[in-house]
Amino acid sequence: MKTNVNVIEISNLWVHYGDIPVLEDINLTVEQPRDLMAIIGPNGGGKTTLLKVILGLIKPSKGTVKIFRESPAINRKHIGYVSQHSTFDFDFPISVWEVVLMGRMGHAGLLKSYSKEDKLKAYNALNIVNMVEYKDHQIGKLSGGQRQRVFIARALTTEPKILLLDEPSSGLDTHMQGELYDLLSKLKKKMAIIMVTHDLTAVSLHVDTVACLNRKLFYHGSKEIPREDLEAAYHCPVEMIAHGVPHRVLKDH
Ligand SMILES: Nc1ncnc2c1ncn2[C@@H]1O[C@H](COP(=O)(O)OP(=O)(O)OP(=O)(O)O)[C@@H](O)[C@H]1O
Ligand SMILES: [Mg+2]
């Protein structure tokens, strides 16, 4: 019989920057079978902080985070991460291929050269995001949507079991967003995906579960967020944050 595996387990987690609490008593379990989960919430609500805690880049002041029952330090290798603002000097003459290969750096080591396996995995990752033909292009000369695909490919080179994406759809036009969500629904068959987004329409159309975060996490393991939760998280009536939020996201809308 197949038993469920807890991919991520967060219990009674608190994070402070100085004396200020940014995350308060967060509890979240992400299980297999795998879903595409969205985290929504206002600016400054702690979404990026939560992803960094999952990655083990920020230490909680209280509580625990487990990735496949171990600490993030041990199991970070199973996580692929696409950060919110890819800090890159886009004038720097570096090719798509080099950017994707960088995802293998942890395996190759800073001073070692990339192995055949590194190159094969980088190629496969580019293939998954449909960007092989841009392999030799300079990263700075791609469109925002194409660049986003390259950064996803870079995160995929380690064949992660968990993929964290911080606002991957920002700056993309509707067509490119559609392509991104098609890609994510393909990828979710192989890995758990958590995506931070402000795009509530996408949430209603493309994700399986949604959590709302504003210091506290409002999550019911489903795609519906009760109106009270959204209002509590955003500190304002729902109508003000998203007119026309589809019914599947908002109960009693
Ligand atoms: N390194 C830091 N030092 C001090 N405070 C920080 C630090 N990083 C974030 N914060 C603060 O913590 C809070 C949460 O920030 P975070 O970046 O996690 O929010 P977010 O939900 O990702 O916001 P956005 O939607 O704007 O990306 C904010 O008030 C922010 O100013
Ligand atoms: Mg953020």
Image (spheres, rainbow, N blue to C red):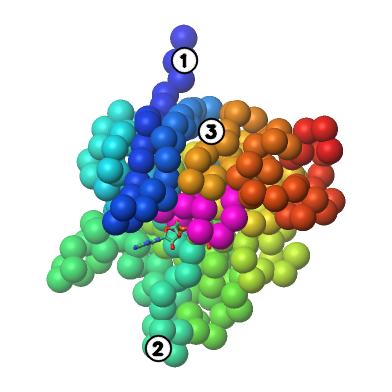
Q: Check if residue 41 falls in the magenta segment.
A: yes
Task: Please provide percent x and percent y for residue 68.
Answer: 34, 31
Mark 1 to mark 2 CA distance (whole Å):
49 Å
The residue depicted at 69 percent of the width and 65 percent of the height is 176
Task: Please provide percent x and percent y for residue 200.
Answer: 71, 51
- Identify residue for label 3: 34
- Identify residue for label 2: 93
Q: Quick one: label 2, few (<14), some, or many (20+) residues within 10 Å?
A: few
Q: For this view, does 55 lie left or right of residue 193?
A: left
Q: Please tell me whether mark 2 sits on a helix, a strand or a loop.
A: loop
First in residue order: circle 1 vs circle 3: 1
Q: Check if residue 23 falls in the magenta segment.
A: no
The residue depicted at 35 percent of the width and 67 percent of the height is 101
- Identify residue for label 1: 2
Task: Please provide percent x and percent y for residue 97.
Answer: 41, 73
Q: Please tell me whether mark 1 sits on a helix, a strand or a loop.
A: loop
Vertical arrangement, residue 155 with respect to residue 193, above or below: below
Give the mark toward the camera: 1 or 3. Answer: 3
- Of residue 79 and residue 14, the one placed in the foreground of this image is 14
First in residue order: circle 1 vs circle 2: 1
Label pair 2/3, CB-CB below 8 angstroms: no
As shown in the figure, which amino acid type bears the numbered disc 2? Pro
Q: In which of the image's four quarters is ligand 1 placed?
A: bottom left
As shown in the figure, which amino acid type bears the numbered disc 3? Arg
What's the magenta region?
A: 39-49
Q: Please tell me whether mark 3 sits on a helix, a strand or a loop.
A: loop
> Looking at the image, can residue 76 be seen?
no
Vertical arrangement, residue 126 with respect to residue 71, above or below: below
Q: Which mark is residue 249?
A: none
